[in-house]
């Protein structure tokens, strides 16, 4: 008897006329909007557009379509942050020049960490010590150097000198005085009032000011780390909407 009752909701659903199901789906209104960030909370953000219209956007923190992007100052970098940059290294793993550009990013499913050789037709890898490499000692260090992409967490950073962990090795590099830093994060912990918000999602006609985001991009209005952290304006919290049952 209990087994038959478990199937009852499915039977009831199947008996709903298709016309009513189609009508329910049409009640969802597609939303594409752009505005400025006003406030942020764990499960939602508040946005206002140029016309003064405000809406609350409910965000799924696990979505792979959450993006917070922009630029940053070198003072923003901290040990533990994931960075990626390109440079040329000799066979001993010594960088041949300053790092002029790097990216700070969040770990995602398709993230590849480590030392990735840039295709150049030359055999061998960073920190390599094979017999073939030993037979090439007559070549100059310049001719033996190769470009690599380094991707991993910052182990230490001070006075523009940075150490990045890659597997069981450490890569030491020096950052240029005017190093260009871009970031791409999967969460909005560093988002601030005034940042630009672009959202794709849907809403119910009865609650047009509440948007369920399927894709959300926030672009920082100012470089992170440039101003004193104590003077940064913190976004005012709004109620956490994780408990909403309407959607």
Image (tube, rainbow, N blue to C red):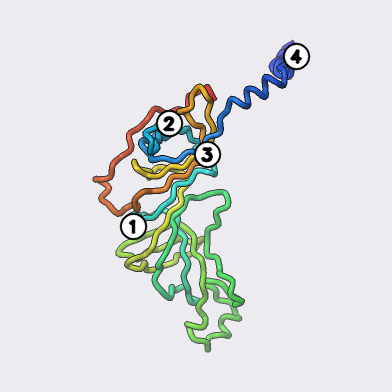
Can the viewer see residue 7? no
Q: In this view, does 90 lie to the left or right of 12?
A: left
What element does badge 1 sit on? loop
Q: Is residue 47 above or below residue 173?
A: above
- Residues at discs 1 and 2 in contact (Cβ within 8 Å): no
What element does badge 3 sit on? strand
Q: Where is residue 35 in the image (x, y as percent from the top left)?
A: 41, 40
From the image, tell me which residue sits under label 4. Answer: 4
What element does badge 2 sit on? strand
Q: Which of marks 1 and 3 is nearer the N terminus?
A: 1
From the image, tell me which residue sits under label 1. Answer: 73
Q: Disc 1 and disc 2: Cα gap in Å?
A: 31 Å
Q: How crowded is mark 1: few (under 14 residues within 10 Å), some or many (20 or more)?
A: some
Q: Where is residue 38 in the image (x, y as percent from the top left)?
A: 36, 37
Q: Residue furthest front?
A: 51
From the image, tell me which residue sits under label 2. Answer: 55
Q: Disc 1 and disc 3: Cα gap in Å?
A: 30 Å
Q: Earlier in the sequence, mark 3 or mark 4?
A: 4
Q: Earlier in the sequence, mark 3 or mark 2?
A: 2
Q: Disc 3 and disc 4: Cα gap in Å?
A: 41 Å
């Amino acid at each position: 008897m209990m087994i038959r009752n478990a199937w009852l909701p499915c039977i009831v659903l199947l008996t709903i006329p298709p016309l009513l199901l189609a009508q329910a789906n049409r009640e969802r209104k597609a939303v594409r909007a752009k505005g400025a960030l006003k406030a942020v909370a764990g499960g939602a953000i508040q946005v206002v557009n140029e016309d003064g219209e405000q809406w609350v956007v409910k965000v799924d923190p696990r979505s792979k379509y959450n993006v917070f992007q922009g630029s940053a100052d070198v003072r923003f970098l901290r040990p533990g942050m994931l960075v990626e940059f390109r440079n040329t290294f000799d066979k001993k793993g010594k960088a041949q020049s300053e790092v002029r550009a790097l990216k700070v990013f969040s770990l995602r499913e398709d993230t590849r960490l480590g030392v990735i050789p840039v295709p150049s037709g030359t055999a061998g890898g960073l920190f390599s010590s094979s017999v073939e490499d030993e037979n090439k000692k007559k070549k100059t260090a310049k001719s033996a150097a190769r470009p690599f992409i380094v991707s991993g967490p910052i182990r230490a950073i001070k006075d523009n000198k940075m150490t990045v962990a890659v597997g069981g090795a450490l890569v030491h590099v020096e950052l240029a005085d005017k190093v260009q830093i871009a970031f791409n994060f999967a969460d909005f912990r560093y988002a601030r009032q005034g940042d630009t918000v672009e959202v794709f999602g849907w809403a119910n006609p009865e609650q047009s000011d509440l948007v369920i985001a399927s894709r959300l991009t926030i672009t920082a209005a100012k470089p992170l780390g440039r101003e004193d952290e104590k003077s940064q304006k913190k976004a005012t919290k709004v109620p956490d909407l994780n408990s909403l049952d309407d959607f």
